[in-house]
Amino acid sequence: MNPDVHGQAVVKAPADFADLSNVSLVIACAQPDKTVRALGERCWSANIPMITASNAGFIAEIRSAVREHTIVESHGKVWPDLRVMAPFAELRAYADSFDLGALDSTDLAHVPFVVILIKAADRWAAEMGLEKKGLTYKQRKEILALVQQMAPAAGEENFDEAVEAVNTSCSDYVVSNDVNRILTDPAANTADAQTSNFWLLANALRRYVASEYGAGKMPHSGAIPDMKADTQSYVNLLRIYKQKAEQDKAELTQCLRKVVQEAALADDHVSAGEIDTFCKNASQLRLVRTHALHHEAETAPELWDNLVNEGVSEHYALFRAAGVFLEKHGRYPGIPDADTGAGDLDAQCEQDARELRAIAVDLMTAWGNKDPEVAESLVAEFVRSGYMELHNVAAVVGGIVAQETIKLITHQYVPQNGICIIDTANNLLAAVKA
């Protein structure tokens, strides 16, 4: 359908793919655990993302593994960065240009709510003799009351916007935990020819935040929300924030230049477009490091406690038990032996169910579970299905895998970090994070 997409089919066993150097991502569907572990180890060593998907009737499992995955455009929800409590010079001058007491009710109704908040916060600080830092909920309520007093009449939209923004805008500036994790990562303190552009930029961002100019804040994105204001006032305000964003980007670019020089790289090693995108999304950076799939056979799953808390530990154990069963018998539970007659199938399924459950219990015990329980209904579904796919469940799994693939290839949005268990018979979907 898309003429820019080209495909090629190569029919080989997974073990026969000797070269993964040109591979961006590996998807392993309905592959035995032994194959997944071997392929997963190769992908892990090369830092190639890998997604696995398995179906057993109404039950499915999706796992993802990548040693390190960095995201600039995570498209997460963030509060507008308005700098109300500590306006930069141009924003302060803009706010001071409004004399709210001299405006009539018509003009007052078109003042941007950012200006109203700055005026109210200044008035509160002056009346209380306090700095605009570390405000408690009660103190923010006092600013909110001032905003309401300043309104010429109830129901003025711009003042209502100011009221709604008090809690988020009249708080101390905080760098998110996700971004702090990146800034404090050892990789953000390295700079050599092998360092990726993301970590070069993260190194520069760390220096920017620690600098006198940055003062603990991220570069501004230049974006502000829509608000009730006359066109000229809004355009002027937007221009001020965009100019601030350009100034911040220039400062970060200077930090980056020092980083690339330390790495003995060219000044233009990181493109201007990449710097621009990084600055606009600096407050939404993400780092994903999952657990390795190829370690599952030797040690307890690192996500085991999370699986237990989400109520899907039995599902996970049965998927691993089915892999052990396959290695032992050369078939999945519920699949007839070559010499099994039609009349003997029920007896074989009962025997397979007992053995599958026993393997799952042994695995859970080895993983530290005391007196593990495995629901008979779950065991019965694994055996009944013969580890086969149902078209409707496979369609759901395929859709999720497709979404995760796009996230991992484009480095946009935050991909699944761990294991997803789907039990359509019991209306259950659990995404267990690392």
Image (tube, helix red, strand yellow):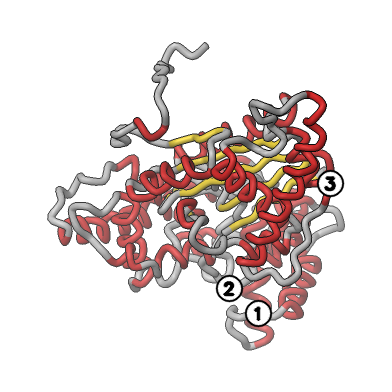
In the rendered structure, find residue 172 and report the number of the disc placed on it. Answer: 2
The residue at the point 62 percent across, 60 percent down is 115
- The image shows residue 185 at horizontal and vertical percentages of 38, 67
Q: Are the residues at dot 3 and dot 1 in contact (C-beta closer than 8 Å)?
A: no
How many marks can you see?
Answer: 3
Residue type (three-letter) at the residue carrying disc 1: Leu
Q: Nearer the viewer, residue 196 or 381?
A: 381
Left or right placement of residue 392 versus residue 119 in this view: right
Q: CA distance from mark 2 to mark 3?
A: 52 Å
Q: Earlier in the sequence, mark 3 or mark 1?
A: 1
For label 3, the crowd category at 10 Å Cα-Cα, with few meaning under 14, some 14 to 19 and many 20 or more, is few
Residue corresponding to mark 3: 377
Q: Nearer the viewer, residue 428 or 56?
A: 56
- The image shows residue 279 at horizontal and vertical percentages of 41, 51
The residue at the point 66 percent across, 61 percent down is 362
- The image shows residue 281 at horizontal and vertical percentages of 47, 50
Q: Nearer the viewer, residue 263 or 137?
A: 263
Q: Is residue 6 visible to the viewer in this orientation of the structure? A: yes
In the rendered structure, find residue 135 and report the number of the disc placed on it. Answer: 1
In the image, residue 115 sits, relative to residue 229, either above or below, namely below
Left or right placement of residue 192 versus residue 64 in this view: left
Can you tell which of label 2 and label 3 is closer to the viewer?
3
For label 1, the crowd category at 10 Å Cα-Cα, with few meaning under 14, some 14 to 19 and many 20 or more, is some
In the image, residue 419 sits, relative to residue 133, either above or below, namely above
Q: Are the residues at dot 2 and dot 3 in contact (C-beta closer than 8 Å)?
A: no
Q: Nearer the viewer, residue 333 or 28?
A: 333
- Judged from this view, the residue extending furthest toward the right is 154
Residue type (three-letter) at the residue carrying disc 2: Asp
